[in-house]
Amino acid sequence: MRPSPSRAALILRLAIQDLWHDRQVSLCIAAALVAVIAPLLLLFGLKHGVVSQLQRELLDDPRNLEVRMLTSGSYDEAWLDDVRALPGVGFAIGLTRSLNTQADLLKDRRHFLKGVELVPSAIGDPLLADLSRYPQGSGVVLSEPAARRLDVAPGERLTLAASRRLEGQQERGRVEVEVIGVLDAARFPRPAAFIDLELLIELERFRDGHASPLLGVTSGAQRADYPLRYARARIFASEGEAVAGVVEQLEAQRIETASRLADIENVRAINRVLGLIFGVIALTALVGCLASMAGAFMANIDRKRREYAVLRLLGLKRPAVAAYVAVQVGLLSLIAFVAGLGLFALGAAVFNRALATSHLASGVVSHITAAHALIALALTLGVALLVAAIGVARAFSIQPAESLREA
């Protein structure tokens, strides 16, 4: 039978007044629960914060998504399309022979770079994700070291030059390019220019002895059917979890690769180890908390056997007694959780400030999300429910007649 609203209000009022009357005992029970909740929240916050930071650093650096081909071959456009269609591949673009991926950049007589690395790029290139424009036509993106040495900024123009020897004659091709962006050194630390793939292919045609009106050279072969072949490709996985799959699929084609898969696996291993450590500690602490709270409530109920007997004598049935005990356990658990959450916030602030000033970590290293807090609250109430069940079983053994025998 469900208690009436007035009966429920009476039970709630009696439970609160009883807790306040024995506030020293109530405080001790709540403190025991806080002593478990606060350290567990802080430990989980550190685990989640550290692993999240490591994962964020990996994902924020697209170099960790790159799968580099170590060997050169001869691949056509169909092969490149097949690579783009592989599960887990987020970006792929062809590369010419290594000899043809270098050129000179000139601003004036005082600012020039020889043998700058040329990197083909296009829309979707993860390295250029922070920029608003991608290389197209004569537009190029310079790495910060290259831009610094050339003393150029976006909007300025440079001369891209390449040399060849044809029939004993030294020839030099030139094309004017516009700097449309500068890539941070953290993304690409070497002097380089990200250019349109068509421009890179044109440079290869020039070096292979073909005429190149684009580079201002009319001598050489006039073949219009220049065979388009790639020596390698720039390949990026769509996400960190996909790197292993991309490596496996390329190696199945007998293509040797290099990647930062080991770094990604290290983060996964750290996550697993920290998860295991936290799980064991949390389970041990929850069992200890359950035993401590159950013992405290059972002792408290035994201490108040006469009061419980009087309540039963006054008409409180077993459901009402169960609600009475559950309300007390629930209130103490909620108070303890709020206090534990406050202590966690204080401890997390201390950790974050201390580690940030010591340069051991950057950003927040201890934090939990709202979802984590709700899960912690659910676990706390779950433990409270078990304690209430034990306490109710103890209270049910008290008979109304006990109050008459002790009167």
Image: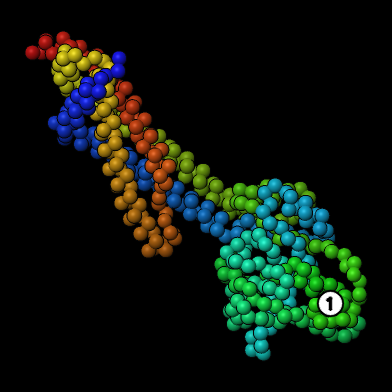
Query: 261 or 76, which is in the foreground?
Result: 76
Question: Going by the picture, which residue comes out furthest to the front?
Answer: 5
* Circle 1 crowding by C-alpha within 10 Å: few under 14, some 14–19, many from 20: many
Give residue 284's position: percent from left, percent from top. Answer: 38, 34
Which quadrant of the figure contains the C terminus?
top left
Q: Which amino acid type is shown beneath numbered disc 1? A: Ser
Give the residue at x 19% y 30%. Answer: 16
Residue 147 visible in the displayed image: no
Left or right: residue 253 versus residue 177 is right
Left or right: residue 94 versus residue 374 is right
Query: 7 or 201, which is in the foreground?
Result: 7
Give the residue at x 56% y 67%. Answer: 186
Please name the residue that numbered disc 1 is placed on. Answer: 212
Q: Is residue 164 above or below residue 304?
A: below
Tell me the quarter of the picture where residue 31 sits: top left
Left or right: residue 205 versus residue 62 is right
Give residue 311's position: percent from left, percent from top. Answer: 17, 17
Give residue 367's position: percent from left, percent from top. Answer: 40, 50
Give the residue at x 27% y 22%. Answer: 323
Q: Is residue 239 above or below residue 73?
A: above
Tell me the quarter of the picture where residue 154 sits: bottom right
